[in-house]
Amino acid sequence: MNIALLKRTITGFIWQKDLAAFPAWKVALIKLLRVFYATALDLKDGQITLRATSLVYTTLLSLVPLLAVSFSVLKGFGVHNQLEPALLNLLSPLGDKSLPIVNQIISFVDNMKVGALGTFGLLMLLYTVLSLVKKIENAFNFAWKITSSRNLIQRYSNYLTVILVGPVLIFTAIGIKASVNNLTIVNDILAIEPFGSLILLAGKLVPTLLTLAVFSFIYMLVPNTKVNLRSAVTGAVTATVLWKITSWIFTAFIVDSTKYTAIYSSFAILIIFMLWVYTTWFIVLTGACVAFFHQHPERTSSHQQPLRLSCRLREKLALTVMQLTASRFYHNQAPCSALQLARTLDISEQAILLVIDALEKNGLLAKICIQGKAVNNAYIPAQALENISIYHILNAIRMAEETSSLHPEEINSNSRVEDLTEKIAQSLKATLSEISLQDIVREPLRKAD
């Protein structure tokens, strides 16, 4: 069996339409494969890799200020002594190279006296830390196909909660685990079978469960949207499995390799550390993609993937969007959001938003807010239906994404091209100016999900 035939066989199995005839376990498997397939397409696009690479630089720049702020808070709760063991645990895949890295980080944190920075220095310290969290949120929003960020008040209140409260909870949990392990009663129970074996097994599972809990917490809190617990846990399970596998590979092959030392000499530790930071962010963002597609299974369709719209596709989408919004307005139906339009047309929400943005800028669509709805931004015609001609719609979408620095009239072309361009514009205007949007809304109303 050649690769092309194997690919067609797998693709046919994943995207078969009639799932009603299959048992429940097979349907669940196919849906899960669709989630992983869509995630693989996202990763293949390269943007997730680019975001992970960007976060490596930001992490290196902001790591010490972040730990300094967290360390100051942890001192107040008396759990600051857990900082070093936690860092060692986080960098455990680096093997014996983790100790000098952690010692260097701890020395940087100890040398940074937050109280001696002054007001301006403290503000700059907080700004550096908050900028890190802001870039993390942007990366998560990209994975979740979200174009809007939180407002300023929500942003800094949520960020400060993560920065100040998160480390306290994590290190407190680590401290409780260490304290429980040192209790005499626990040591006594370890000598009794089968309780001793069960406790040892639980001790091995606790780090994995803590990792799973941390990933789930991140996937629910960071994206600027409501994330279902089930989807967050699915992404967390994926990230945890990838974390464990990558940690083993990193320890077995990369850390013990002498090539890095031979090539980079004393910089080998830094290079290995940067590789691990990049790998960590890549795994985290991959889990975020899985959580997104699990929560939005309709987006796994090949039609729902981000795509470059051709001119004729933009024109048809613009006409269809205006027809749907106008029909619902004409028949006194509830207006549609961009997500509802995307589900109705079985196409990505980004494509719909690109078209809507052009129609909004030309005064053909208006955004309204519906209170009490999960998705409260919906769209209605911005003018009377009889005043919106088909020519207006096509002209608006044809001018989409034109910049003020370059117009078609500014292109140096000969007189024949100029005459032909003018003739096309006049032909469209003469043919379509007399057809209004109201003329096409009397068709049967399509249902929006």
Image: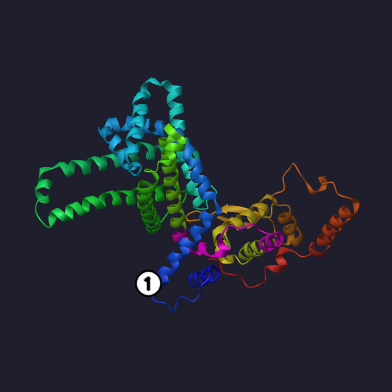
Residue that lies at the very extreme toward the right in this rendered image: 415
Q: Is residue 150 visible?
A: no
Is residue 310 in the magenta section?
A: yes
**Labels in figure, total:** 1
Residue drawn 42% across and 72% down?
27
Front in this rendered view, residue 391 or 129: 129
On screen, residue 92 above or below 196: above
Front in this rendered view, residue 1 or 222: 1
- Residue 326 image position (x, y, % from top left): 65, 63
- Residue 263 image position (x, y, % from top left): 46, 37
Q: How is the image coloured?
A: rainbow
- Which amino acid type is marked by label 1? Trp
> How would you rate the neighbour count of disc 1 (Cα within 10 Å): few for under 14, some for 14-19, many for 20 or more?
few
| Side of 437 where 82 appears, left or right | left
Residue drawn 42% across and 77% down?
22
Pointer 1 residue:
25
Q: Secondary structure at mark 1?
A: helix
Residue drawn 36% across and 28% down?
109
Can you tell which quarter of the image residue 444 is in? bottom right
Residue drawn 53% across and 58% down?
41
| Side of 18 where 416 appears, left or right | right
- Residue 148 image position (x, y, % from top left): 54, 47
On screen, residue 176 above or below 290: above
Front in this rendered view, residue 398 or 388: 398
Secondary structure mostly seen in the magenta stretch: helix
Can you tell which quarter of the image residue 235 is in? bottom left
- Residue 35 image position (x, y, % from top left): 46, 62
Front in this rendered view, residue 264 or 42: 264
Q: Is residue 50 visible?
A: yes
The residues colored magenta run: 293-319
